[in-house]
C-alpha cells in the first residue's frame, strides 16, 4: 500500500480494467457504479482510476482493480492506450470529475487491460468510489462512463483474436466442465453459432482435455461427462508447432 505522503497520483494517466466472466451461458463483464454526485444519477463504468507517479502500469492496474472490487492476484493483459482529447468531455463525466478530481480539466490517457476470471471463484466487494460491483451480460450493457464502451469493445476484440491462438477460455470455466459448456463459452465469446459436432471433434482431437469419471447430477437431461483442461498436454501440443485453435 502506498504512503500518500511520499506518493502522488499522476493526474494524466489512468488504468481501466475489463474483467470478463462466464456464467455457463453468457459472457459477462464486471462493472462498477460510481458514487452519486449531487445532481447526478449513479452510472456504470469499468473499474479504473489514476495511477501513482512511481508505480509500474501493471502494478497500478492490479491495485486499482483491488481497491474498487476486492479482486486480487488475477491475470491482466494490456489492451492498448486510449487517449482521445475528448474522451472525458461528456457533461455527466465532466460533472463527476469536477466533484472528485483535483485537476478535472487534465487530459487523461488510460491504459486498458482485460482479464478472465471464474465467476464462482470471485465475489466482488466494492470500495473506494465504487458503490457497487456487478456482473452484467455483455449484450445488456448500455452506455458507460467516458469512453469505456470503446475500451470494452477493444478488449473483446483482443479476446476473440487470442482465442484463435491460445485456449485462454478455460480461465473462465470451473475446473470441471462439460463439452456443452465449453461449446457455449466459445459461442458466447465469438458471437457466432458453432456446429456442435465439428467443435467437439476438433477439441477432442487436440487432446488437451482430460475426461473424468464423473457426470452431471440433478439435470433434466442425460447427464454429460465432465472434463478438465490438461495444461501439460497443451504445452506438449505447442512444442509440435500447432498454433491453430480457431473455430
Image (cartoon, rainbow, N blue to C red):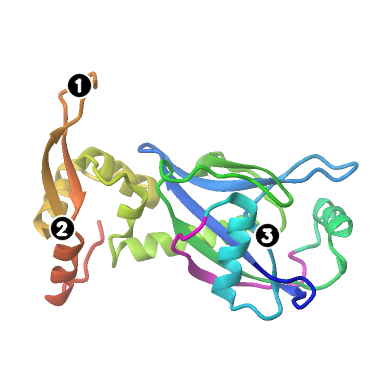
**Residue at coordinates 24% horizontally, 20% vertically from top-left?**
218
Residue lying at 37% horizontally and 36% vertically, measured from the top left: 25
Residue sitting at the far bottom: 54
Examine the structure image and report whether residue 205 is included in the region drawn in magenta: no
Which span of residues is magenta-colored?
72-87
CA gap, disc 3 and disc 2: 38 Å
- The magenta stretch spans residue 83: yes
Residue at image mark 2: 208
**Disc 3 from disc 1: Cα separation:** 44 Å
Earlier residue among tags 2 and 1: 2
Left or right of residue 30, residue 94 in this image: right
Tell me, for residue 147, which label it has, or none. 3
Q: In the structure shown, which secondary structural element does the residue marked by tag 1 occupy? A: loop
Query: Which residue is tagged 1?
Result: 221
The residue located at (63%, 77%) in the rendering is 55
Whether residue 154 is visible here, answered yes or no, is yes
The residue shown at (15%, 46%) is: 200
Amino acid at each position: 500500500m502506498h504512503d500518500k505522503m511520499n506518493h502522488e497520483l499522476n493526474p494524466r494517466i489512468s488504468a481501466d480494467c475489463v474483467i470478463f466472466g462466464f456464467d455457463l451461458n453468457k459472457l459477462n463483464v464486471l462493472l462498477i457504479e460510481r458514487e452519486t454526485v449531487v445532481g447526478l444519477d449513479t452510472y456504470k463504468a469499468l473499474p479504473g482510476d489514476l495511477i501513482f507517479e512511481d508505480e509500474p502500469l501493471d502494478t497500478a492496474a492490479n491495485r486499482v482493480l483491488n481497491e474498487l472490487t476486492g479482486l486480487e492476484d488475477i491475470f491482466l493483459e494490456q489492451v492498448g492506450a486510449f487517449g482521445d482529447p475528448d474522451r472525458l468531455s461528456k457533461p455527466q463525466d465532466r460533472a463527476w470529475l469536477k466533484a472528485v478530481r483535483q485537476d478535472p480539466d487534465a487530459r487523461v490517457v488510460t491504459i486498458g487491460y482485460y482479464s478472465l476470471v471464474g465467476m464462482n471463484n470471485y465475489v466482488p466487494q466494492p470500495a473506494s468510489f465504487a458503490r457497487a460491483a456487478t456482473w452484467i451480460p455483455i449484450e445488456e450493457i448500455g452506455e458507460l462512463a467516458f469512453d469505456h464502451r470503446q475500451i470494452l469493445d477493444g478488449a473483446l476484440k483482443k479476446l476473440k483474436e487470442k482465442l484463435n491462438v491460445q485456449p485462454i477460455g478455460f480461465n473462465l470455466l470451473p475446473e470441471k466442465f462439460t463439452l456443452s459448456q465449453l461449446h457455449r463459452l466459445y459461442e458466447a465469446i465469438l458471437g457466432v453459432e458453432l456446429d456442435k459436432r465439428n467443435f467437439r471433434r476438433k477439441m477432442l482431437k487436440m487432446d488437451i482435455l482430460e475426461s473424468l469419471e464423473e457426470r452431471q447430477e440433478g439435470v433434466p437431461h442425460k447427464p454429460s461427462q465432465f472434463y478438465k483442461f490438461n495444461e501439460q498436454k497443451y504445452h506438449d501440443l505447442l512444442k509440435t508447432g500447432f498454433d491453430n485453435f480457431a473455430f
